[in-house]
């Protein structure tokens, strides 16, 4: 008699909440389970990191949905290659694009923290020296705002800003 195959398990995740309570719960989850910190005593950088992870989850959820739609419709995609991107701080931008500024502010107030303090904790990703790097970042931002399927590729620097020198003329 052939061995029985186990029933296929289908795991469907519900969409993530876009309210203060859901964001607070997810941020606390990352603080405690991923970073090993307590909400009350966690450093600003820990709270920033936990909130970033919660926002990233929501961005990935939307990115996956968009990717699936483009694939189903056999739509065209654009890949943008730039040697540098001068993005600046991204948390405020992510909050704005997700419509979660108020929710994040309310979630952090429950923890006796201010959103502006947490946003200012983010280091500036100074990749490049401006000019074309800022233009590349603005271009990708506008593509995202228009809902265009564009992916940006660049160089990963080990130490942030790079230095250019002219030697021998």
Image: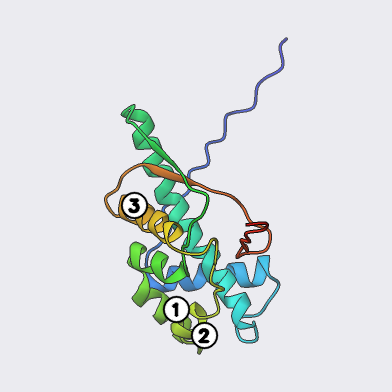
Across and down, in percent, residue 145 comes to 29, 55
Applied colour scheme: rainbow
From the viewer's side, name the closer residue of 96 and 14: 96
* Residue that label 3 marks: 144
Residue drawn 64% across and 56% down? 157
Q: Position of residue 25 (x, y in %)?
A: 51, 70
Q: Height in image: 78 above or below 20?
A: above
| Mark 3 vs mark 1, CA separation in Å | 26 Å
Say what secondary structure mark 1 lies in: helix
| Residue ID at (68%, 77%) | 37
Mark 3 and mark 2 lie on one chain; the one further toward the N terminus is 2
> Helix, strand or loop at disc 3?
helix
Mark whose residue sits in front, 3 or 2 = 3
Query: Which residue appears at 36% of the width and 41% of the height?
Result: 149
Residue contact between numbered discs 3 and 2, judged by CB atoms under 8 Å: no
Residue for point 54% across, 61% down: 128
Q: Where's the C terminus, which quadrant? A: bottom right
Q: Say if mark 1 contacts mark 2, CB within 8 Å.
A: yes
Q: Residue furthest front?
A: 169
Q: Is residue 104 left or right of residue 48?
A: left
In this rendering, position of residue 67 left or right of residue 162: left
Dividing the picture into quadrants, the one containing residue 161 is: bottom right
Q: In terms of sequence position, does the residue under pointer 3 or pointer 1 come before the other?
A: 1
Check residue 107 in the rendering and tell me which mark sits there, or answer none.
Answer: 1
Where's the N terminus, which quadrant?
Answer: top right
Q: CA distance from mark 1 to mark 2?
A: 7 Å
Q: Circle 1: is it few (<14), some (14-19), or many (20+) Cα within 10 Å?
A: many
Residue labelled with disc 2: 111
Closer to us: mark 3 or mark 1?
Answer: 3
Image mark for residue 38: none
């Amino acid at each position: 008699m052939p061995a029985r195959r186990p029933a296929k398990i289908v795991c469907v995740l519900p969409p993530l909440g876009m309210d203060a309570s859901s964001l607070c719960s997810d941020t606390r989850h990352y603080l405690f389970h991923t970073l090993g910190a307590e909400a009350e005593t966690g450093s600003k950088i820990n709270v920033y990191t936990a909130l970033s992870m919660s926002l990233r989850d929501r961005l990935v959820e939307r990115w996956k949905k968009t990717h699936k739609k483009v694939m189903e419709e056999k739509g065209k995609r654009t890949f943008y290659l730039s040697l540098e991107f001068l993005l600046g701080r991204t948390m405020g931008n992510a909050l704005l694009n997700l419509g979660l500024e108020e929710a994040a502010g309310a979630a952090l107030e429950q923890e006796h923290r201010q959103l502006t303090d947490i946003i200012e904790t983010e280091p500036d990703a100074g990749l490049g020296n401006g000019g074309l790097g800022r233009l590349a970042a603005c271009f990708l931002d506008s593509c995202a705002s228009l809902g265009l399927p564009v992916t940006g590729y660049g160089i990963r620097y080990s130490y942030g800003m790079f230095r250019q020198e002219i030697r021998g003329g």
